[in-house]
Amino acid sequence: MPAKVLIVPINTDLNRGDQALSWESIEIAKSISQETDIYLYKSNHNPDLYKQTDKLGYNYLTRILQHPGRGTSNKNIRQTSFIYFKWGIKAINDILITLLLLSKYKFLNKLSLLFLSKEKKYTYKIFKEIDFVFLKGGGFLHSYGKISNAYVMYYQLFDVFLAHSLGKKVFVLPNSIGPLKNSLAKKIVTNALSKCSFLSVREGASLSFLKHLSFNPYLSPDLGFYLKPSKRDFSEYLKKRGVEIGTKHCIAITLRPYRFDGKKNAKYLYKNYINQFKIVVNRLINSGYHVSLIAHTIGPSAHEDDRIPLLEVYNSFEKNKNLTYLYDNSLDCREIEKIYSYYNLVIGTRFHSVIFAINVNTPAIAISYGGYKAIGIMKDMGLSEYIVPIEETNSDKILFLIEKAFKNNKAVINKILLYKNTLREKRNELIHRLKKEL
């Protein structure tokens, strides 16, 4: 009888990094059990958000704990105080219902079920039949002191708590965890992780952080490093869109919307972030480089839609043959990864655009944000000098690193190859350790 495996949290194909982590988590699950029945969560009722993964034939469930912003339009990077208030009311209601479901008392579980939709009741039924829960890789377990951080951690880890309450094994695949500056958020995260059967992190900074909290996690590379690029030839695809591959140095840039949560000067920091990249692009195209602004992630919310900052930059220029904007929602993670192979350099705010570039031996500069992922992984590869914190976005610094990356191209590629040479062994070791916990 096949083992039933649930991959959490939610998957969306609009985020190519998240898609890659889901797909590689599935491959890991298949490697530790001879037969598997894979379950994933729908992002919501919009099939466009998961249609690429849906073609692979896996089972989809509706998540029990939904985002408090469900049912509302989300077209702005920043939300108003009134919107946050409305979300807060929904979140309180959700907490009360889901805590009943987590209770050890069955009559409270039954009471909670009265408030769940038919789809969510079905999810709960399947959850009780699940053999293992895999918390896929990522970098979503961090907080910087906001009051709402505690709820965010509960929201992210609800499925882990539900698995614990039902006696299911939870395997935490390589994640970035920390910092956790909100004390309640830290308590929620440590409580969830302490009962997991297997805990792994994807870089040294998270390893050190968790060791300070008396955990002993296993260090293993980000699952995105195992993604294989598409075999499709994108030469003509790029040329038709004006990318001058093969005739001049081509640089790909990924930007993401960012709220700069917890910063008093958040609006200034975002404006500076955009303006500094306008300066970078202007210098590059006037120096004969070809620059492509690539939409790596395109939703599902405005805060996850890279088109917003990319178009702020792109639309500030007159039409120029050295500048292209690439947006194609039909591409999956393997195809985006292959596209990065045609570039000489990637400047990535989306860190999986950096990982994808490295997978195809393209040097990259990381614009780091949100936790330890970029800082930790680049350091582990010996490339920490090619990081710019998003709060400190500076055109002179980025241009200096671009020049340095081209000048030291062979040395950078050698470091990439050295790191990649260890990946097969490390993947096998991860699978071996997971098998021991079955």
Image (cartoon, rainbow, N blue to C red):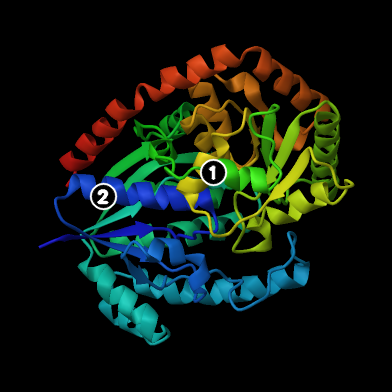
Give above or below for 139 relative to 41.
above
Residue 337 placement, left or right of 252? left
**Vertical arrangement, residue 396 with respect to residue 367, above or below:** above
Is 122 placed left or right of 328 in the picture?
left
Task: Name the spot of residue 325 as percent of width and height, x first.
Answer: 72, 48
Decide if residue 25 is on the left or right side of residue 352. Answer: left
Residue lying at 48% horizontally and 23% vertically, measured from the top left: 380
Q: Residue at x 64, y 29 (%)?
A: 246
Kind of residue indicated by mark 1: Phe
Taking depth in this image into account, of 269 and 21 the one nearest to the observer is 21
Q: Which SS class for mark 2?
A: helix
| Quadrant occupied by the N terminus | bottom left
| Tag 2: amino acid | Ala
| Alpha carbons under labels 2 and 1: distance apart | 31 Å
Which class describes the residues within 10 Å of circle 1: few (<14), some (14-19), or many (20+)? some
How far from the left and from the top, in percent, is residue 371?
Answer: 58, 39
Q: Is residue 266 visible?
A: no
Q: Which residue does the numbered mark 1 point to in the structure image?
A: 234
Name the one closer to the observer, 40 or 434.
Answer: 40
Q: Is residue 263 in view from this perspective?
A: yes
Q: Are marks 2 and 1 in contact (CB under 8 Å)?
A: no
In the image, residue 228 sits, relative to residue 82, either above or below, namely above
Mark 2 crowdedness (10 Å alpha carbons): few <14, some 14-19, many ≥20: many
Residue under label 2: 29
Q: Which of the pair 434/331 is nearer the observer?
A: 331
